[in-house]
Image (cartoon, rainbow, N blue to C red):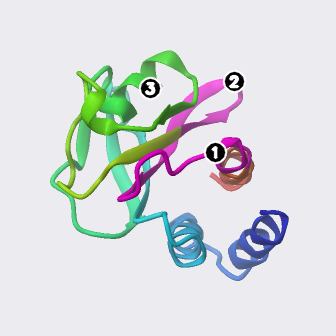
Amino acid sequence: MEALKQKIEEQIKLFNSIEEKLQAITDTLEKELDYYDWVGFYFKNGDKEELKLAQYTGEETDHTIIPFGKGICGQVAVSNENFVVDDVHAQDNYIACSIHVKSEIVIPIFKDGENIGQIDIDSNTASAFSEKDERLLEHVCKLVSEFI
């Protein structure tokens, strides 16, 4: 995972715009980790209590706006804590993006102590995510907070 952290750090230096940097991150994670089937960023939508989809890699999704508290992403917007789901079908408050998704991980992004968004990863593999994934994605979120 250390080599991947370095690769992401190098990738984001190649681009100037926030959008290009975010897209480089999603593309790199999805390409390098075969169990990362959908990778995307959601950010707080202005003053509204909702998240808005930004850059992502993977299948298109209808979930471009997610109210706080709804689904895994919406819950992280409220709890401000990492959320690792081994089996999405066991979650009462899960918003299905694809029938193929079996597990999910969502890590919040903090800027100046405020939760401004998150990275969301879906996997078509059950129990796909480990503590190593959490640490990697926390590192990615820290990088994002530095250029956003």
The residue mark sitting in front, 1 or 3, is 1
User: Which numbered disc, 1 or 2, marks the residue that appears first in the sequence?
Assistant: 2
- Crowd around label 2: few <14 · some 14–19 · many ≥20 (10 Å): few
Instruction: In the rendered view, tell whether residue 99 sits above or below residue 68.
Output: below
Query: Along the horizontal axis of the image, is 36 left or right of 46?
Result: right
Extreme-front residue of the structure: 126
Label 2: which residue? 113
- Crowd around label 3: few <14 · some 14–19 · many ≥20 (10 Å): many
Instruction: In the rendered view, tell whether residue 34 sits above or below residue 73.
Output: below
Query: Along the horizontal axis of the image, is 115 left or right of 51?
Result: right
Tell me the CA gap for discs 1 and 2. Answer: 25 Å
The percent position of residue 20, horizontal first and vertical second, equals 54, 74
Q: Is disc 1 placed on a helix, strand or loop?
A: loop
Magenta span: 107-135
Query: Along the horizontal axis of the image, is 9 left or right of 25?
Result: right
The percent position of residue 116, horizontal first and vertical second, equals 53, 35
Label 1: which residue? 130
Identity, as a three-letter code, of the amino acid under mark 3: Ala
User: Which numbered disc, 2 or 3, marks the residue that appears first in the sequence?
Assistant: 3
The residue mark sitting in front, 1 or 2, is 1
Determine if the magenta segment contains residue 121. yes
Determine if the magenta segment contains residue 128. yes
User: Which numbered disc, 1 or 3, marks the residue that appears first in the sequence?
Assistant: 3
Tell me the CA gap for discs 1 and 3. Answer: 21 Å
Label 3: which residue? 77
Residue at horizontal 21 percent and vertical 51 percent from the top? 97
| CB atoms of marks 1 and 3 within 8 Å | no
Identity, as a three-letter code, of the amino acid under mark 2: Gly
Residue at horizontal 63 percent and vertical 45 percent from the top? 130
Residue in the foreground of this view, choosing between 25 and 47: 25
The residue mark sitting in front, 2 or 3, is 3
The percent position of residue 83, horizontal first and vertical second, equals 51, 30
